[in-house]
Image (tube, rainbow, N blue to C red):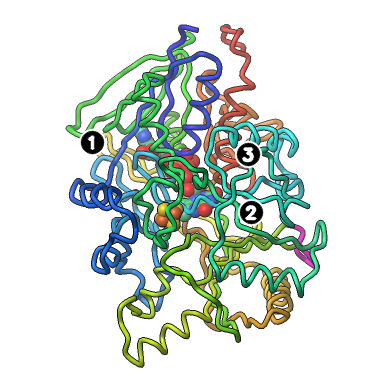
Amino acid sequence: MSLSVLVIGSGLSAVGAIKALRARGIRPTVIDRGEKLDSDRSDWVSAMAKKTPDQWDAAERYKLSSNPTVTDSSAIPKKMLFGSDFFYGKSTHDAPVHCEGNFPPFSYALGGLSAGWGAAVLPPQACDVADWPVSHDVLNEYCAKVLEELPYSARDDGLSLDFPILSHRLNALNPSQSDLSLLDALKKSVAIKKGQLVFGQARLLVASEDDEHSCKYCGQCMSGCVYGSIYKAGNDIIKMSERGEIDYVSGHIVERIAEKNGQVKVTSRDHSGSVHHQKFDRVFIASGAANSARIVLRSLDLYQRKVQMLSRGGFVIPMLSFKRLPSNWPNCNTQPGLFLEFRGKWLKHWVHVQISPQNELLLQKFSVKETDNQFIAKLKRALVARTVLLLVNYHSDHSGSYELWLASPEKNNDATSLHSIHKQSLPQWRIWFSSWFKLFSIFRRVGCIPLFPFAKLNSGAYHVGGTLPMKEQPKGNLETDTLGRVAAWKRVHVVDTATFPSLPGTTIGLLTMANAYRIVDQINWNLTSEND
Ligand SMILES: Cc1cc2nc3c(=O)[nH]c(=O)nc-3n(C[C@H](O)[C@H](O)[C@H](O)COP(=O)(O)OP(=O)(O)OC[C@H]3O[C@@H](n4cnc5c(N)ncnc54)[C@H](O)[C@@H]3O)c2cc1C
Ligand code: SF4
């Protein structure tokens, strides 16, 4: 098909859309800001990747996981990539942001936020997407489709009772000793109940097969994977570009889009400030929930119009195990090893808990060095060996939100500021009380006590969406149809989490790729008239 098609962005949603375009024989152009890890860091990361983990010395390992936010006791450590936070978007001269409260999560990186994400995935459950105009079965069908081409570590265990595995390629990572010990204890003492409580090995987009990128069990997952085992959209973009399947153009920020006479005109600005205009037959906006809304608001001159950006989040709760958990760190994978999903009284949506025993950030938090043999260090190590982190995530109905709007262009300058107010809110007390009570009653049976007084609220930090929600009958230009289109446009489709009517607590990355794939797949490509 000789259509000229543009995808804006290179994150998970962009890759979902591109794969569906490729399946139709379309070779899209991909425009992206495309920021990368600085060259100094990428050089030493490449050098480390040439060695096996046992060849790394303690200083190299320490450098890899260096993260200044870990020692701040007032906040949850920020996830970094090899000590850099480059993949979190910042306010820039050409795209200024003013905010109250937390900075809204968005990215200008090659691969977007997936450059530093956790790669935890679960398909959505029907009760969590009941307000979507697309059925849960269709969403799962597309989750299965995108999983076909992704590295996927999953085991057919208790989780599958409610969360189908959706793949015949079951290549699970070896759980760490502490994960195994906790999982065994849960299996012995806690009954799995379909629709109420399920748990099992974490499902992760990580290569576990025997290929060049398969996990080397180096114990550094929370700091970045030098071996490229954790899936990142950016690596897929590079591969597709090298194979000539896409035309990848980085260094551009798309500012405006206009649709006229069956063509879409796209205005972007490059690093030097030069403005570019290009025309396409169809455009897919995959710039992340905040930036996709920004492009739509600016293109349609919707200044001062407020949009709500939903978030999914919850608490990070440390938990103490009465028993010392066995550890094979650093020779293990340190991503959250277990998932526990539950519903119950007052909890109509699934609560998603990622369980993470010992990892390198925890060791760093307690300033425990691998080589240190002093008494205090041993004591700290003993404490770390009894500490487990629970990442508790609620559906967006129970998490905070952001209010976003675009200021009018400044005089003599076309730059417009994005304004954001973070409305961080505790979940309703019933949700909070009910989920904490449930966690307490589950974990006390395995000899663990969640330390609720040390819980930290973690809403809106990473998972956002819903700025241009899909509706069965969308109204105006701030809602989209099931193909991600606002009323003003026929050939421009928003394909990222901006279109999510709500965000399941049970991860959104896989759903993001699946929904983008679905939008492209369900377009009637044979129709070219204005009314398609
Ligand atoms: C630390 C962290 C951990 C996470 N862990 C998980 C997890 O375990 N599981 C999970 O499901 N989700 C997780 N997430 C969330 C997940 O990463 C995001 O929901 C997902 O990556 C969003 O993908 P996206 O394609 O919608 O947008 P983004 O990743 O934000 O990508 C946007 C892309 O658009 C480009 N762009 C933006 N604006 C413009 C513009 N104006 N012009 C041109 N290009 C533009 C950017 O360069 C970027 O490539 C995590 C996020 C973070 C930050
Ligand atoms: S343990 Fe983690 S960081 Fe190390 S190779 Fe495996 S996925 Fe990568």
In-front residue for pair 409/267: 267
Q: Is residue 159 visible?
A: yes
Q: Which residue is mark 2?
A: 506
Of callouts 3 and 1, which one flags the residue occurring earlier in the amino acid sequence? 3
Which quadrant of the frame does ligand 1 lie within?
top left
Whole-percent x, y for residue 25 in the image:
51, 13
Give the quarter of the image for residue 102.
bottom left
Q: Given the image, on which type of amino acid does mark 3 rest?
A: Arg
Please say if 89 is above or below 69.
above
Q: CA distance from mark 2 to mark 1?
A: 43 Å
Please name the residue shown 39% across and 31% down the image: 237
Of callouts 2 and 3, which one flags the residue occurring earlier in the amino acid sequence? 3
Q: Nearer the viewer, mark 2 or mark 1?
A: 2
Q: Which residue is mark 1?
A: 413
Instruction: Give the extent of the magenta segment.
Output: 343-348
Q: Which residue is mark 3?
A: 169
Q: Given the image, on which type of amino acid does mark 2 rest?
A: Thr
Examine the residues drawn in magenta and state their main secondary structure: strand
